[in-house]
Amino acid sequence: MSSTEFSLPNVDDPASTERGVILMGLTADRLLAGLGLASLADDPTLVTLVVDQARHGAVSGMTMEALLDLGIGRWRTVRHALDVAASTIATSASLRQLWAQALHAVQGAEVGDVGPASRSYLAACWLRRFEVDKHLEATRVVPDLTPG
């Protein structure tokens, strides 16, 4: 007999875990823009809010296109280092377990000194790397980053 019980996350999980679940649900362009903004301001919640505002044209002097350019540059710089560091992540059906493993991999990757927003957005981009890479291929002139 299967259980129909709804399971909530562990109350002892850090807030970064729930933030990660939310980030993993963002579109590739929002992830890349967040990664770009994180290079300027490294508060994960603030970055997510500002990206959403920029997406709607509500941020003076900061366009979504500029944030995307920053994020794309950063992604291309660290992509290989993340692949190497995350090569031991086991596939899991649990988003929270995947998130914790991805954050750990980002912390161990050789991507320079990064703060909480950068770690969060790098982990989310890596977990959604196939979608992020396809977005880059579809919208930018970049080499094919996805495996054959």
Image (cartoon, helix red, strand yellow):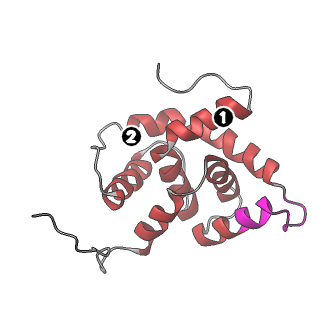
Task: Please say whether residue 57 is one of the residues in the magenta stretch.
Answer: yes
User: Residue 67's spot in the image, x, y percent?
Assistant: 75, 52
Label 1 residue SS: helix
- Tell me which label, 2 or 1, sits earlier in the chain: 2
Task: Please say whether residue 145 is one of the residues in the magenta stretch.
Answer: no
Where is mark 2, residue-wise? 85
- The residue most toward the front is 1
User: Residue 111's spot in the image, x, y percent?
Assistant: 52, 44
Which circle, 2 or 1, is nearer the viewer? 1
Mark 2 Cα shell of 10 Å, populated few (<14), some (14-19), many (≥20): some
| Residue nearest the observer in this picture, 22 or 67 | 22
Per the rendering, the mark at residue 90 is none
Q: Residue at x 66, y 71 (%)?
A: 46
Q: Which residues are magenta?
A: 50-62
User: Residue 101's spot in the image, x, y percent?
Assistant: 34, 53
- The residue most toward the right is 61
Report whether 86 appears left or right of 46: left
Report whether 83 appears left or right of 78: left
Where is mark 1, residue-wise? 136
| Residue nearest the observer in this picture, 91 or 74 | 91
Q: How many marks overall?
A: 2
Instruction: Give above or below for 63 relative to 12.
Output: above
Answer whether residue 55 is visible to the viewer in this image: yes
Mark 1 Cα shell of 10 Å, populated few (<14), some (14-19), many (≥20): many
Instruction: Give above or below for 121 relative to 4.
Output: above
Q: Residue at x 31, y 76 (%)?
A: 8
Mark 1 is on which residue type? Leu
User: Residue 135's spot in the image, x, y percent?
Assistant: 64, 37
Q: Determine which quarter of the picture holds residue 60.
A: bottom right
Mark 2 is on which residue type? Ala
Label 2 residue SS: helix
